[in-house]
Image (spheres, rainbow, N blue to C red):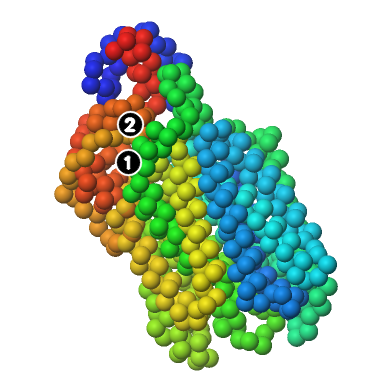
Amino acid sequence: MAMEGSHMTKPVSKVAAVEEDDFETGEVASKQYSSNPLVAFVQWVLSFVVPGLGMFSEAYFIFSIGNVTSIFQKEYPKCWGTKSHPLCSSRLVAGIMAGMVFIGFFADRLGRKRGSILCASIMLLGAVMLIVSDGPDQKGILLMYTISQLVFGLGVGGEYPVASSSAAERAEADKALQDRRGETVVLTFSMQGVGNVANVIVLMILLAAFNQNGPTYDPTRLDWVWRLSFAVGLIPIFIMLYIRIFRLKESSIWQAKHNNMAKAGLNDSFTMHKFSLLMYHYWHRLLGTAVSWYVWDITFYGNKLFQGTFIKIIVGPNVGLLTTVEYTLLNAVIALVGYYFAAFTIDKRWMGRTRMQIMGFAWVFVLFLACAIWYSDLIKPAHIHVFQFLYYMSSFWGQWGPNSTTWLLPGEIFPTETRAFTHGMAAATGKAGALTAGLWFEHLSNQSRFYVCAICGAIGLSFTIVFVPDITGLDPREADTRKFFLNHKARNPRLAQGLVLTIVFVPDLTGLDLREADARWFMLVDGRSSEYVGEAIKPRHLSLWERIVGYGKVYDPSAPKLDLKTLSMEKKLAQKLQI
């Protein structure tokens, strides 16, 4: 039979020598929900709660640094000062960065399931170490606490690329979810917000139970409060590890890619040649996502680390711990609402990925700039509610914007073969922003911190506009074909609209079949980059930078869709016919 829809320049007509059933598309049967509305709703919630347990645990423990700072200052006044807080956060971030890169690489080579199990195992070890942290004196406890955070950070870091890649591929494998890929991924990520809220609620309950609302505090009872709060966090980690060992199936998209390349006789290992191709053809996407994430994390984690300071400004200096935590809870709930706004609008054609990221960066820029310019007036009692509104709304727009999109985009705009690794590199660069905030913000005044956050919002806008493409509607497997084809540079006069990092470097793949992205990569690796003319290089799915250098000039709207199954069959047939 003829290979209809082939992008190969040489005609292929005798495919009988290749059994089509030997190759895989990676698609799975759509999940069937119960006809009972209540049961169906529970099933739908579990569809993102269970995959999101890793992000829940990440937030529960990581954001607790800011949440328990006030407790540590009361319990360990001799060693928990202005230098101790950044020291702990920097050790934690260092562990996270290492986990992102190394476990991301591991997950691309050995599979998403093994990567997920490794993350959960390390997180469990780190969590237990946090709970039992002890020493001969306060400094000894602090030392063990920071080492435990380093270990926990390794597991958390790996969760970023593994969870994002798995969620994107799970949506792409299910036909019913292919047009809701962004929603699927962001709902998984939204468990981060749930984890933050849960940690604050647990702290409130424990502070009330141990009667620790001031004005005097019992160090022994405060010790029980933070250790028990971490112990509660062990429950979802145990559940997550059990599910990943005994119930989790390997990503069908990753498995299909792995099997098809092997059957086609292609090298599935990540060679230096592939790495050089990745850097040559995708450097701008990596730059756009990484720098956008970097400046966002300066803002996001800078505010998280010093959240207690800003909440104290809002509630006043003489209130108790419980009241402070209540206002922290309100901020966390407002942020959580932002996650859900992001999830339910990100696949809409009028929104998309890059537009949402640009919008979020723009609002963060405006809100923090207002806080910086009028800071002296805003913190006065007469205007403190205006300050509270501006600060809380920055949390909302941060989630309905760059916090969600920076996690989603690297899981879509790179091919399956390198998805977790490149996501890990972008995420690690982002966490360098958190490290920068932890070491830098302590030397700044509160007003200067807001100025820095506003500037970061402007930089994030710029890089998204120029370097990140919009792949709304594109199947990421089509982008894998493009990576298999890429050498051609052409000009396209149509420029993106919007503000400047997001607009220039970040593409928006909303609606793009990820199989097209995989097909592009497949052709690039095979040395046939100039032959690819499919949806992965459609101008609307390219960043401003990619349009300027001409990636979309050869786009053919009439070209049929490609996937790794078709291309693997062509490759195997070509070998048999010796063409």
Name the residue: 83% across, 73% down: 220
**Which residue corresponds to mark 2?**
524
User: Can residue 412 be seen from the camera position used here?
Assistant: yes
Pointer 2 or 1: first along the chain: 1
In the picture, the disc for residue 220 is none
Q: Secondary structure at mark 2?
A: helix
Tell me which amino acid carries mark 1: His
> How many labels were placed on the picture?
2
Mark 2: amino acid: Leu
The C terminus lies in quadrant: top left
Nearest to the observer: residue 71 or residue 541: 71
Few, some or many residues within 10 Å of mark 1 (<14, 14–19, 20+)? some
Looking at the rendered structure, the secondary structure element under dot 1 is helix
Nearer to us in this view, 284 or 241: 284
x 77%, y 61%: residue? 133
| Mark identifier at residue 281 | 1
Q: Residue at x 76, y 66 (%)?
A: 141
